[in-house]
Image: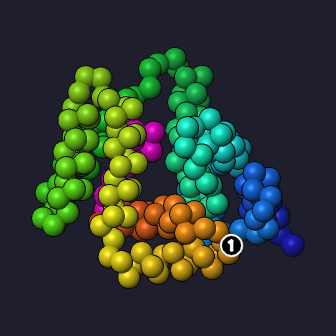
Amino acid sequence: MSEDWSRRQDYYQQIARAFLKHQPAIFFIPPRDLELISEWEKLGLPLEVIIEGIDRTFARRLAGRRKKNIYSLSQCEKEILKAYAQRQERLVGQQAPQAPDTAGKATRVLQEVLSCLETLPPELSEVRRILEEARAALQATPPEEARLEALDEELDRALWDLTPEPERQQSLASARQDYPGRTDSQLEEIGQTRVARERRQKLRLPRLALFYY
């Protein structure tokens, strides 16, 4: 067995253990989540950052008023990318103390939002409204980061609401296969996360929260 293969196997196994320790009722990582780990590996996300993001996701769930069920690694991606962004800022700070480049990130996201608004189909009026609000938050001084994070979550919900019923049912059926025994509301949370991710890619919708950049 090659050293590279051993390293990759360890990467996958440690991520799986970090997630499954929070969900002892789940005994395996489904194929779609394994594909997500593969994407993180290609992006070069460090193992410790992913584990930190997983732990944060479950800690946030316990602290929140609404105890959101976490059954998929895709539901941890937000906190993982946030942890990675913070790690990068710490590394930059160690090299040369300076403030995080919030303005630079906001400019980049604003450019993507403006570009998306130009090509957005007219029937996606709710998506347009959210992007227009994001534009205002990005143009504020300083950029309204908390508002942008809230709008990013609102966009995910809007994409689920706009998804045709047959596609929703297909997503729920796939989630039910991956997570047998879950309630319809739990499966909908998983399905919503997956569908939003797929539709963002299809429509080339930018992430609005600055920590993604």
- Above or below: residue 189 compared with residue 180: above
Q: Can residue 37 be seen in this view?
A: yes
- Residue located 52% across and 20% down the image: 96
Q: Name the residue under label 1.
A: 181
Asked whether, in this view, residue 137 is left or right of residue 145, the answer is left
Residue 19 position by quadrant? bottom right
Question: Which image quarter holds the C terminus?
Answer: top left
Q: Percent x, y for residue 175?
A: 57, 73
Residue in the picture at 87% in, 73% down: 1
Q: Position of residue 83 (x, y in %)?
A: 58, 39
Q: Nearer the viewer, residue 7 or 211?
A: 211
Q: Is mark 1 on a helix, strand or loop?
A: loop
How far across and how far down the image is residue 87, in percent?
59, 34
Q: Which residue is drawn at 38% across and 82% down?
A: 166
Q: Give the range drawn in magenta.
A: 204-213
Q: Nearer the viewer, residue 96 or 61?
A: 61
Pick whichever, 117 or 84, lies toward us.
Answer: 117
- Main secondary structure type of the part rendered in magenta: loop
